[in-house]
Image (tube, grey):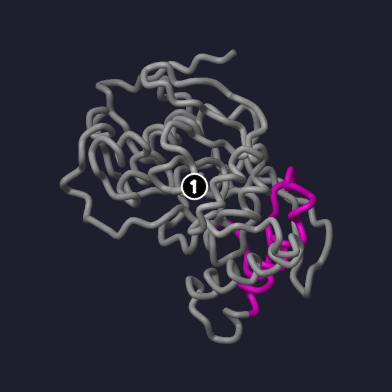
Amino acid sequence: MPKNNIIEAQDCSPQQVYTRNDVIQTRQDIAPSQSKKRKRRKKRSKVKVASWYKLSQIQKKKFMDFKGYPVYYVNDLEIRNICLEDEEFTDFAIHYNFPDLIPENEIWVSEEVNKDELMLFLNNAAKQYNLIKDGYDPDEAYEKAIKYEKSLREKIKNSESYYSPSQPEAKKLSDNVHIQRYGVITDEDITVWIVNGKEVRDAYKTDYVEGGHGYVYDWIPNDEIWIDNDTKDEERMAILTHEYTELKLMRDKNMEYEQAHHLASIEEYKFREGKENIWFIVSKE
């Protein structure tokens, strides 16, 4: 545990300090915002990156050009461990998602990306760049590219096995998504599952990534937390720390998603730094 139970956003984030109790109690000094579900890629960073030395150590390997844009493999875990701001990097991103991290016109892809989804991600990235060049705002380009990627997934699935989250039959697919039980949070009998991330993105939410729970996604049972099978074993407890913290804040304190996600991200990053201990028990079979 950090000294005096202080939880502090460091390096890439504005210097805001929270006590341990703030993770469980509603923050009155955080401006309220509309609840929205987590994006797979961060939209536009507005925070200057301070850890220039760490950034200089990132190794990237060019492996192709796609529609005129150079594509590089990177170690996504290494990037997420740089600072709180870059903890949002997952399977791929472009310059406008992380302007202080990724050079203009480059596409960065996780070196362990699901190869069945690689072309979907690259089409999304190129679409974002092209829309921005056509004059669209990066946020609007992001949303349009997500819809484009979703349409490609639907074509691949031939529409027959695709269910919208708004359809009741979408619940049926959840039984096929589970890969293996990761463990149980013993305090309240919440089961943690490793799930097929590609199937979730195909069937439920195109920009689902890393993890989720039923207080953000209505197609996940409230007594379950899902972790994407694309994640690395060594960071799954960090992701679980984020998801369970976020779940408790939204469920027990009626906190809106944006507020809960912000505090959960701080908890996750502290765990990644080794400055935070697990405050709940996970029983693994």
- Between residues 139 and 253, which one lies in front from this camera angle? 253
- Between residues 221 and 242, which one lies in front from this camera angle? 221
Please state the horizontal and vertical placement of residue 265, each as a whole percent of the image: 41, 41
What residue is pinned by disc 1?
219
**Residue, far bottom:** 134
Residue at (78% x, 74% y) in the render: 67
Asked if residue 181 lies left or right of residue 119, the reply is: left
User: Circle 1: is it few (<14), some (14-19), or many (20+) Cα within 10 Å?
Assistant: many
Please state the horizontal and vertical placement of residue 242, each as a whole percent of the image: 44, 36
Q: In the rendered view of the protein, which quadrant contains the N terminus?
A: top left
Q: Is residue 55 above or below residue 18?
A: below
Residue at (46% x, 60% y) in the render: 45
Please state the horizontal and vertical placement of residue 197, each as a whole percent of the image: 64, 45
Please state the horizontal and vertical placement of residue 209, each as a whole percent of the image: 57, 47
Residue at (27% x, 28% y) in the render: 20
- Between residues 198 and 43, which one lies in front from this camera angle? 198
Q: Amino acid at mark 1?
A: Trp
Report the magenta residues as a range: 101-130
| Count of numbered marks | 1
Please check the rendered image and state whether residue 120 is part of the magenta-colored stretch, yes or no. yes
Asked if residue 32 lies left or right of residue 181, the reply is: left
Q: In the rendered view of the protein, which quadrant contains the C terminus?
A: top right
Judged from the image, the secondary structure of the residue bearing numbered disc 1 is: loop
Please check the rendered image and state whether residue 166 is part of the magenta-colored stretch, yes or no. no
